[in-house]
Each structure stands twice: as structure tokens, then as C-alpha cells.
Amino acid sequence: MAIANANLANQPGSIIVDDVSMVFNIASEQYNSLKEYFIALSRHKLRFKPFYALKDISFSIKPGESVGLVGTNGSGKSTMLKIIAGVLSPSEGTVTVNGNIAPLIELGAGFDHELTARENIYLNGALLGYRKEFIDENYQRIVEFAELQDFMEMPLKNYSSGMVARIAFAIATITEPDLLIVDEALSVGDQFFREKCERRISELVESKNVTVLFVSHSVEQVKRVCERCIWIEKGNLRMDGPAAEVADAYAHMER
């Protein structure tokens, strides 16, 4: 793996996850109120126990690969994505990501819900590194892809989660990022828009210019979108291989 990592180190779109662990401290006792919690804290009686969300995870992704992440709820998938996106820092190990990232991790992140959808397009675009001139040139394409032409002057707080997903996806994929991270963002949209997003992701995958990291509980969706799949379960890397093979193994695991 060291040789592969050395070759990938400076290639845009590459990801190197090296022996990563993520530890959260959880209170060892349950408290019925914040008052009880802070009383225990002030008396130095608050005790914590470590919870390993991820344990010694290592893998590397080549530029242009489409990789799915699967696992049951609480398995560590979203934590892994947040570390790759730079939202969290690992407790142990290192992650190297080369190139610009378009993350679709948490709906509403990077938006101000008091602003209109039009204003949020410029705000979110700026956070993704797009110049105002670029947004000006591509504004209509973003709106048309999201299919929300009649709602651009509406405050985002009045949008449904599906409408927010449309705006977020349209902004993130208006150009070709080096790395696109999608974490269940498409699950809240309607069927027709999900299919439209899948087609756009497939276009990015086929271009071989964009690395796609995709989390979904739908194994069929993972098999359609991804060529490779990584299965994380209870914080451990359980399987890494062809998408169909890993997704089927995950689907037939004992629950």
C-alpha cells in the first residue's frame, strides 16, 4: 500500500486513508437533565468512556474511481466522510485528499435559511470556491437543474428538505469537482429527481475526471452508481472490493 500511496500522493482526486481511528468520549452515566449533568461536572463526578466510531481504517482511492460506502446505521460511514471532507479530524492516523471537494454531507450545511434560494446559491457557491462571475454565468443552469424557477426569491426556511437537496446538488455538480462526496442527500428527493441526480453522477463517473464517494442504504443504488464498494461495520473495515460483490454480501449479512 505504501507504494500505491506514494504514487497517489499528488494526483488530484486521490484519497489516502492511513490507519484512521475516531474516538468519542461518552458519559458513562445517564442524566435526566442538563442540571444533573452540570452538577456532576462541577463536582468532578462526571466520568467518560471511549467509543470508537472508527478503528484502524486504511484504504486508498484512485482519481476517477466511483466508490460506495455501506454499513448499518451507526457503523461509522458518515464519520469517515466527514473526516475525508475535513469536517472532523481523526483521533489517530492520517487522511490525505488531493483536489477540490464538493461535499453533500448534511442538508442545509453552507446555507443561511433566512436568505432566499437565489442568495444561497451565491453563498454556497462561494463556500465551494466558486467566483461570483462563475455563479453569474451558471446561475440559470443551476436553477434549471434544480427545477425551482418559481421559488428563487423564497427564503430557504420555507423549503422542504427535498427542495434544499435539489439546490445543494445543482450547485455542487454545476462543474466537475475533483471529488464529489454524497451522503444520503438524494434519499429525501422525489423519485424523478433522484433519477436525474443519478444520471448526473453517472456522467461525472464516466468522465473519469471526478472521484465519487457515495453513501447509500440502497445496495441497488450503490451497484448502479459505483464500481467499487467499501463496507464499514461497527467501526471496522469489513470488506473492500467490486461494488456488486460487496453490496450483495452486505445485503445478506445477519442482522
Image (cartoon, rainbow, N blue to C red):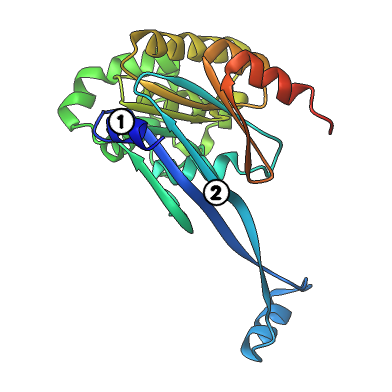
Name the residue: 38% across, 23% down.
211
Instruction: Evaluate whether residue 110 shows in this view.
Output: no
In the displayed image of the protein, which residue is found farthest to the right? 254
Q: Quadrant of the N terminus?
A: top left
Give the label on residue 56, or none.
2
Instruction: Report x, y in % for residue 178.
Output: 31, 26
Instruction: Report x, y in % for residue 79.
Output: 54, 46
Above or below, 159 relative to 206 = below
| Residue 115 horizontal side relative to residue 136, left or right | right
**Nearest to the observer: residue 202 or residue 252:** 252
Give the label on residue 229, or none.
none
Instruction: Report x, y in % for residue 171.
Output: 36, 25
The amino acid sitting under disc 1 is Leu
Instruction: Report x, y in % for residue 200.
Output: 43, 12
In the displayed image of the protein, which residue is found farthest to the left? 133
| Residue 107 horizontal side relative to residue 10, left or right | right
Dot 1 alpha-carbon crowd within 10 angstroms: few under 14, some 14 to 19, many 20 or more: many
**Nearest to the observer: residue 213 or residue 63:** 63
Q: State which tag comes first along the sequence, 1 or 2.
A: 1
Q: Secondary structure at mark 2?
A: strand
Instruction: Say which quarter of the image contains residue 206.
Output: top left
Looking at the image, do the residues carrying marks 1 and 2 touch, with CB atoms under 8 Å apart?
Answer: no
The amino acid sitting under disc 2 is Asp
| Residue 73 horizontal side relative to residue 25, left or right | right
Above or below, 161 relative to 20 = above
| Residue 117 horizontal side relative to residue 175, left or right | right
Instruction: Evaluate whether residue 247 shows in this view.
Output: yes
Name the residue: 28% across, 35% down.
9
Task: Give the CA separation, mark 1 to mark 2.
Answer: 20 Å
In the displayed image of the protein, which residue is found farthest to the bottom? 43
Residue on which the image places disc 1: 8
